[in-house]
Image (spheres, helix red, strand yellow):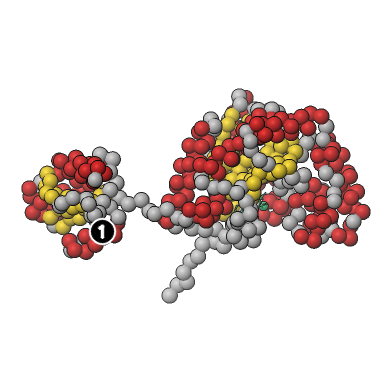
Amino acid sequence: MSQILQAVRGMNDILPAEAELWELFEETVCSWLKAYGYRPIRMPIVEPTPLFKRAIGEVTDIVEKEMYSFVDGLNGEALTLRPEGTAGCVRAAIQHNLTSTPQRLYYLGQMFRHERPQKGRYRQFHQVGVEAFGYAGPDIDAEQILMGARLWGDLGLDGIELQINSLGQAEERARHRAELIAHFERHAELLDEDAKRRLHTNPLRILDSKNQAMQELCAAAPKLIDFLGEASLEHFEGVQSVLKNAGLPYVVNPRLVRGLDYYNLTVFEWVTDRLGAQGTVCAGGRYDGLVEQLGGKPTPACGFAMGVERLIALIQEADGVPEPAAPDVYLVHQGEMATRLAFQVAEGLRDQGMNVLQHCGGGSFKSQMKKADASGAPFAVIIGDDEATAGEAQLKPLRAGGGEQRRVGVEHLAEAIIDQLLDSEEE
Ligand code: ATP
Ligand code: MG
């Protein structure tokens, strides 16, 4: 016997019971985004590798060790499965000249990172990404943060904490960086391998370290906020004043630096303690330099991405998995004439907006009726050759209090079903 094939490690099948929850989630997310004027955009899953190197930064976890990169065997092009959506979205916006006017855009889809799979961390995962181009002021940052709060409410989630910080501008980070390197050099014996490697390339990222042994050293490091100039502080204040007016609680976390290089000014994360170590469900911030860096006209930008698997896990913990939606009608039929009519009846009921599960695969009336009961449908429609000859069908209510079984002309079937539904609602 040949070996059973398995999915790639860290890449999950989402089976129907869970996929139904994903669909509900996506519906909620799409109407939430529309309520804020965001419009959909869909980018390819594969992009040229240099896009990510330039956008995300060479000395980041993603580019150094998490990308699925390969050479296209047919033309030698260096390609990468997208590890995040912002780079591709900016690329698309530049390529199609979307940045000449302000834009609010969103997308949803698979991302790929070669990480160690564990709860809340997969090699294929999904993000909802939100990007706004052409808005320089703190109002859009604040609006994007408020959006999160509304979505958690729409999804019935609570206990998700908001952390914010400001990364200032490049010059401010440069002065802070010099001090930071000096601080870490004074304690060189405490640095782990990653930190040593990053000390002179990307010391800010050392602060993002998850290594417990370095937490104290990081906590004592010079804080970026103390190096921010007036304009940066004003922007940060602007964001905070909107949050305060809205009564939205938040924590300023000076160690929030984000794992990607392109951010400036506002950064934020929404974090829960209910998912263990993988607690960040949404993260984002401002990236004013990226559009120009990727070859576009200078365009301020701000965005965030949510981890769908982590949010789904939270929803499951809060509500459990919803019951699968039952069909309105289970259609039972036996005999050649009956089956011909059954196909017509099923399409006719669907024309009236009903969900019809037509029995397939034959079998006795008794075995078909068992399936009808198990389907959860409130009605079975039963057609034998006898009914078919008369152009009729049996309408059999399956739920208690649904009324008597009766024979109805097929042209009146939809009407009869609706009448019975209304009757049983009145009772
Ligand atoms: P983390 O610190 O958890 O590695 P990150 O900073 O790398 O997250 P971002 O690049 O900001 O993550 O992506 C935004 C969100 O996407 C994260 O907050 C998280 O919810 C989700 N996410 C990121 N990587 C994964 C993954 N490997 N599996 C599942 N979800 C992920
Ligand atoms: Mg990561």
Q: Is residue 130 above or below residue 339?
A: above
The quadrant of the rendering that contains the N terminus is bottom left
Name the spot of residue 232 as percent of width and height, x first. 78, 32
Is 387 placed above or below 168 here?
Answer: below
Q: Is residue 382 left or right of residue 85?
A: left
Disc 1 CB within 8 Å of nearest ligand 1 atom? no
Of residues 303 and 280, the one drawn nearer to the viewer in this rendering: 280
- Amino acid, disc 1: Asp
Q: Nearer the viewer, residue 424 or 142?
A: 424
Q: Position of residue 312 (x, y in %)?
A: 52, 52
Numbered-mark total = 1
* Secondary structure of residue under mark 1: helix
Quadrant location of residue 247?
top right
Within-10-Å neighbours for mark 1: few <14, some 14–19, many 20+: some
Horizontal and vertical percent position of residue 148: 59, 40
**Rendered residue at 47%/56% (across/down):** 320
Q: Residue furthest front?
A: 427
Residue depicted at x 90% and y 53%: 185
| Left or right of residue 85: residue 220 | right
Residue annotated with mark 1: 373
